[in-house]
Amino acid sequence: MKIALLRTPLAAAVAVASIGMTGLATADSLEQRLLDLENRVAAAEQRASAAEQRAELAEAQAEGRLSGDEVEERLAKVERQASGEEGFSFNAYARSGLLLGEDRKSIEGGPYVTPAGGLGGAVGRLGNEPDTYAEAILNYRMQFDNGAKAHYRTMLASGTTTSNDWDGDSNLNVRQVYAEFSDLPSFTGTFENASIWAGKRFDRDNFDIHWLDSDFIFLAGTGAGIYDMQLADNWRSNVSVYGRSFSDYPVRPEFPGDDGSTDSLILTSNNYFGNWQWMVNALSAADNDERDIGEGQAADSGFHTMVAYHGDSFFGLGEGNYKVALLHGQGLGAEVKGLGSDGELTEDAQATRLGIYGTTYVAPNWRFAPVLFGEVSKDRYVDGDDYKWLTLNARLVNEITQNFEMQYEASYQYMDLDPNGRGDLNTVNGDFGKFTIAPTFKPQVGGFWQRPEIRLFASYTDWDRELNDYDADAAFGSDGFTGGQWSFGVQTEVWF
């Protein structure tokens, strides 16, 4: 009981110390010091809990309920749990908000709302999301007497666009279920620090542009792999194989009931040389060339590669970070972000994408994050089609108090889309623009990744009228969504 009572004064002392430092540190150093303090509080609570358990074990031994060996075994487990190397943990991501038009009715939105969205052309997400999406991640870590470690993860996710409190259309998905083993004593030499895994998962080394809600690269599915093979002093490598399933499709149009399906297999080699990353992927999908995609022939194989640089400054100009990635794919690899997820690509499809973003403080209380993101592709779904899009985005944040900041985001996207007669799509060329103001409340401001937060927002969105003609079934040009209008709403975003 005495140990438990020590936690509150300790937490209070830490809180007082953090408040006292707010006027003495720059935003960067303050953010790091607050993070260090939070880690110390968490560690102190773990130590307090471990001390309670040690006391209980000592009492049990004294009373003869446990032998000395049993006490030692359980104490070792307590120590591992106190250090975070063993035990249960929970992580989450969630967003939920209301997006209303000028007529107080729900309107379309989302980072992929433009005609280029179906090709991966994301725009800024701030003040532009009408959905509720949540992920719950359950982890259990184990450490064994020989030093080996195991990590088991299950991830549940659900998303919906309705604002009802009960959604009958919500889809609950098990998005990850896998086990990973590391520190295996039998692994030596090149494999000494390697870990192996199998199951359904998101690849550990995916990375994204959060402000666009777009991954640079998203490798996921069911399979197996090995991480962190040390092939040379400055060469670390991962190898994996992932399987994904394309949806059923009619093999022969004259017999629509004769459905077939095919699997997409991705063999990956992901290599790191200091800050540089080089990823190479080979893709195959047996029988996918039998898919009816109209003109042209569906691909049953493909190639994909990515060269990326993970910078530890803001483009060498100051503190912060940046990432640059150049991606190219052919055949099934022409879906350069969601590897192996598109079975309608032609065997001649080609796509090249460039992504650049950075984060920095331009002043002690001003955060800045610019983005450049674009792609060119041809022969994608029909021989002779040609798609080009480019997104420029920037988010600027002014930290006003410990619990309040003003966020501003501007997005511009250029589109030149020529489907060359695919379906009912029409050739269009035009611009899209969005500007958002979002007063934001937080338990603690500071840093780009500090959550949770609650935002109010107002967004002005406009685009060239020609874009309304791209797809008659899409949001653009629909009733009440023709551009040149304001939208309003509120949103929360949480992760931990």
Image: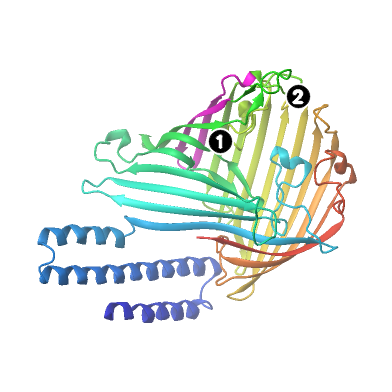
Quadrant for residue 55, please give it. Answer: bottom left
Left or right of residue 490: residue 36: left
Of label 1 and label 2, which has the lower sequence position? Answer: 1
Number of residue marks: 2
How far from the left and from the top, in percent, is residue 457?
A: 73, 65
The answer for how far apart the CA atoms under marks 1 and 2 are is: 28 Å
Q: Name the residue tied to disc 2.
A: 382
280 in the magenta segment: yes
Question: What residue sits 68% from the left and 58% below the top?
Answer: 395
Q: Is residue 238 visible?
A: no
Q: Which mark is residue 307?
A: 1
Horizontal and vertical percent position of residue 105: 81, 61
Q: Can you name the residue that lies furthest to the front here? A: 257
Residue 435 versus residue 59 in the image, above or below: above
Q: Secondary structure at mark 2?
A: loop
Q: What range is drawn magenta here?
A: 262-289
- What amino acid does circle 1 point to? Val
- Above or below, 288 relative to 116: above
9 vs 420, left or right, is left
Q: State whether the magenta stretch is mostly helix, strand or loop.
A: strand
Secondary structure type for disc 1: strand
Are the residues tagged 1 and 2 within 8 Å (C-beta)?
A: no
Magenta stretch holds residue 268: yes
Label 2 environment density (alpha carbons within 10 Å; few <14, some 14–19, many ≥20): many
Nearest to the eye among marks 1 and 2: give it: 2
Report if residue 70 is visible in the image. Answer: yes
User: Label 2 amino acid?
Assistant: Val
